[in-house]
Amino acid sequence: MATSLNDIRRKIDALDARLVQLLSVRARLAQQAWQAKGGTAAYKPEREAQVLRRVRELNKGPLSGAALNRLFTEIMSACRALEDQLAVAYLGPAGTFSEEAVIRHFGSATGSRPHASIDDVFRAVETGAAGYGVVPVENSTEGAVGRTLDLLLNTSARICGEVNLPVRQCLMSNARSRGAIRTVYSHTQSLGQCQQWLARHLPDVERIAVVSNAEAARLAGKDRSAAAIASRTAATLYGLKLLARNIEDDPKNTTRFAVIGAESAAPSGRDKTSLILSTRNVPGAVHDLLTPLAKHGVSMTRLESRPARTGRWEYVFYIDIEGHQLEPRVARALAALGRKAAYLKVLGSYPVAS
């Protein structure tokens, strides 16, 4: 005999009651764990990464791994807020993709704080005004965010996490139609990510780069002949109509963000380490610099060069490698790199983004 709708609902209600009880038990255990740590920082990136990894491994469906990831991020965020209200700095104002990255990584119970520039985010972390910061590092379409790389070179902050955020760009305005738009505001990176779409649909419209997508939305809200490229969240915050969704040229468009704090994360079991290196000005220096990685079985996942700003045609190299700096093989490779490099800075080790 088929189960009636009322029976199904009664079972759901009973499960909901059980879930509430279990969540309360979990929250109390989280408080006990914080007290056992001596009331130190409630956010432990390596532990949270392990929890999310285990949840995904246990998942048998029908919920997706991504859905469970979001649910448990919010559970940990709410439990963390009982112990310590984190202050996380990001490039503001409210409604930026940076804010979305904060929520994706830390959950919505976190005390996020918008700042006017990436420089200000670094400064907030360095001075202790914020416990952590979230800064854009690179985009899959437009490449590295140069200002972030330049600031990483000299900062005392360490990378302790990363966030990979799929970026869905939207055109928004209070104009009656696309034909009434004369100006499009957005961040430089977003304009680049949508340049083909703009060339096809708004070829004669002036494009103006501003400090953030949320600032673009704010400006568009003041001018009925202007539009902004930003997130759907920004459209809601600034009272704009969505004229087109998902206008990024690459449907897999993703921005990688770094989480910066006072310390690296402890090993989580699946980690990454970021470095900055420079070479001596001799033939074959770059090749020799990278040989210790191969010798010690350490895989390199990213290599980016930037002008060193210390002399003409001098460069530094930003490198990501697999593994944690405390792992023996990685430690041996780093020691060998230190002997070969003219300059070596370990930016931090942290869990690989889920």
Image (cartoon, helix red, strand yellow):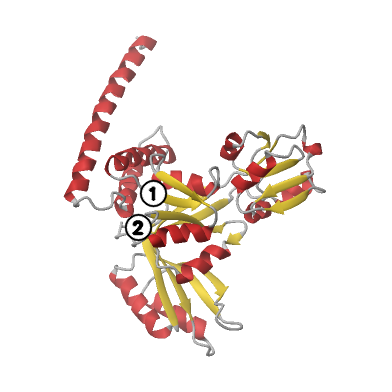
SS assignment at label 1: strand
Q: Residues within 10 Å of mark 2 (few under 14, many from 20)?
A: some
Give the residue number, with chain letter if any, for mark 2.
270
Read off the residue under disc 1.
Answer: 87
**What label sits on residue 96 in the rendered view?**
none
Question: Closest to the observer: 256 or 155?
Answer: 155
Camera-side residue: 79 or 1? 79
Q: Is residue 162 above or below residue 110?
A: below
Outermost residue toward the bottom? Answer: 282
Q: Position of residue 135 (x, y in %)?
A: 49, 56
Q: Is residue 170 left or right of residue 260?
A: right
Q: Amino acid at mark 2?
A: Arg
Residue type at tag 1? Ala
Residue shown at 38% from the left, 39% from the top: 109
Callout 1–callout 2 Cβ contact below 8 Å: no
1 relative position to 214: left or right: left
Q: Is residue 270 at all visible to an observer of this figure?
A: yes
Q: Residue at x 22, y 50 (%)?
A: 39
Q: In the rendered image, which quarter contains the N terminus?
A: top left
